[in-house]
C-alpha cells in the first residue's frame, strides 16, 4: 500500500461565496502529484462522517468532484474531455454544525472560484436502460428485518475489510452493500454482496458501473439480500442490448450484464431517458488561489 505525504497551505476564502451563501473557513486546491506519488483516489470527512469539520479529496478528477458537489452521477456532467483526466487534491475546513446542503454549496462555491467555472443546467435525451424482471422472474431473496449497523467513533485506524465466505463474497452482519475483488483460478473476479437493500440501491450501483441512466421498472418493493459475481467492469462499458449466453470461459466470471440476468433474474432493456445535465461551458485547468 502506498501513502502520499501532502502539506496543505490553507487560505481563507470568506469573500468567495455569493452574498449569504456558505463558504469553507479555509481551503486548498492543487493539481495532484503525478503517478506514482498521487496514490489511489480517496475522499475523507464531511458532514455525516466521523470527521465533519474537514474534507479531503485526494487524486480526484474535477468531473468526480463536480458530481459530488451537485449530487449527480458522472454521466450527468458534460464538459471538456480533461475533466476526466486531470486530477486534483482538495482540502477544506468546514464550519462547525454545517449541514450536508450547506456543505454542497460550499463545495460548489469553491469550485466556481478556483476554476472560474461557467456552467448551466439542461435536459438531454440519453441512451439508457430500464431494469425489468426477466422471463422466468426475479431471483432475489427478501431480507429479514435487521437492525442498522451501529455508528462507532472514528478510531483513526483504517477499517478492516469484511470477512469472506468460501466463494469470496463478503459476509455482512448488518444492512449494507459491499464490493470486493478476488481471484478465482487465474481470473480476477468482482464480488458484490447486498444485505437489506432496495432495488433502487441496485439500480444506483448499475448506473454508476455503466455510467448510464438506468430506471427501475421491476415493480419490486421491499428490501432484499443478493450477491453478484462478475468479471471486472471496464470503465464506461455499455451493456449489450441482449445479454445472451456468456462468452466467458467456463472457469471465468460472466460480464455484469449477464450476471444480472443469470444470477438475479433481472434484465436491462435499452431506452432513451430524459436526464438532468450539468453542462460545463468553461473551467480553468490550473486552479487559482494557491
Image: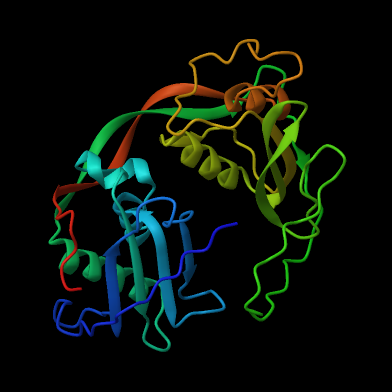
Question: In screen coordinates, is 224 left or right of 65?
Answer: right
Question: x, y percentage for residue 14?
Answer: 20, 85
Question: x, y percentage for residue 21?
Answer: 21, 78
Q: Quadrant of the C terminus?
A: bottom left
The one nearer the camera, 113 or 87, is 87
Question: In screen coordinates, is 214 left or right of 184?
Answer: left
User: Residue at left 58%, top 24%?
Assistant: 257
User: Residue at left 17%, top 73%?
Assistant: 289
Q: Is residue 30 above or below residue 203?
A: below
Q: Picture quarter containing residue 213? A: top left
User: Residue at left 49%, top 29%?
Assistant: 130
Extreme residue toward the front, this view: 36
User: Residue at left 16%, top 78%?
Assistant: 16
Q: Picture quarter containing residue 274? A: top left
The one nearer the camera, 155 or 229, is 155
Q: Picture quarter containing residue 78? A: top left
Q: Is residue 224 above or below residue 154?
A: above
Extreme residue toward the right, this view: 166
Q: Quadrant of the N terminus?
A: bottom right
Question: x, y percentage for residue 137?
Answer: 71, 24
Q: Is residue 258 above or below residue 206?
A: above
Question: In screen coordinates, is 167 left or right of 206?
Answer: right
Extreme residue toward the bottom, this view: 96
Question: x, y percentage for residue 128?
Answer: 40, 29
The one nearer the camera, 1 or 254, is 1
The one nearer the camera, 44 or 4, is 4
Amino acid at each position: 500500500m502506498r501513502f502520499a505525504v501532502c502539506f496543505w497551505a490553507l487560505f481563507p476564502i470568506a469573500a468567495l461565496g455569493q452574498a449569504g451563501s456558505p463558504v469553507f473557513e479555509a481551503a486548498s486546491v492543487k493539481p495532484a502529484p503525478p503517478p506514482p506519488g498521487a496514490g489511489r483516489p480517496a475522499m475523507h470527512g464531511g458532514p455525516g462522517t466521523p470527521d465533519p469539520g474537514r474534507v479531503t479529496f485526494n487524486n480526484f478528477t474535477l468531473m468526480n468532484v463536480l458530481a459530488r458537489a451537485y449530487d449527480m452521477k458522472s454521466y450527468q456532467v458534460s464538459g471538456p474531455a480533461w475533466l476526466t483526466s486531470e486530477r486534483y487534491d482538495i482540502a477544506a475546513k468546514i464550519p462547525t454544525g454545517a449541514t450536508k446542503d450547506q456543505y454542497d454549496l460550499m463545495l460548489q462555491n469553491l469550485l466556481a472560484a478556483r476554476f472560474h467555472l461557467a456552467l448551466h443546467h439542461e435536459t438531454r435525451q440519453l441512451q439508457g436502460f430500464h431494469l425489468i424482471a426477466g422471463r422466468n422472474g426475479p431471483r432475489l431473496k427478501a431480507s429479514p428485518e435487521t437492525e442498522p449497523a451501529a455508528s462507532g467513533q472514528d478510531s483513526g485506524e483504517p477499517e478492516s475489510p469484511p470477512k469472506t465466505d468460501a466463494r469470496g463474497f463478503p459476509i455482512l452482519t448488518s444492512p449494507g452493500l459491499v464490493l470486493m475483488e478476488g481471484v478465482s483460478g487465474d481470473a480476477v473476479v468482482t464480488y458484490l454482496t447486498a444485505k437489506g437493500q432496495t432495488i433502487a440501491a441496485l439500480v444506483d450501483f448499475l448506473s454508476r458501473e455503466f455510467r448510464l441512466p438506468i430506471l427501475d421498472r421491476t415493480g419490486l418493493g421491499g428490501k432484499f439480500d443478493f450477491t453478484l459475481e462478475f468479471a471486472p467492469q471496464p470503465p464506461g462499458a455499455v451493456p449489450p442490448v441482449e445479454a445472451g449466453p456468456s462468452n466467458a470461459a467456463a472457469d471465468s466470471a460472466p460480464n455484469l450484464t449477464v450476471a444480472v440476468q443469470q444470477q438475479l433474474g433481472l434484465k436491462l432493456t435499452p431506452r432513451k431517458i430524459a436526464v438532468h445535465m450539468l453542462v460545463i461551458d468553461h473551467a480553468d485547468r490550473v486552479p487559482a488561489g494557491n
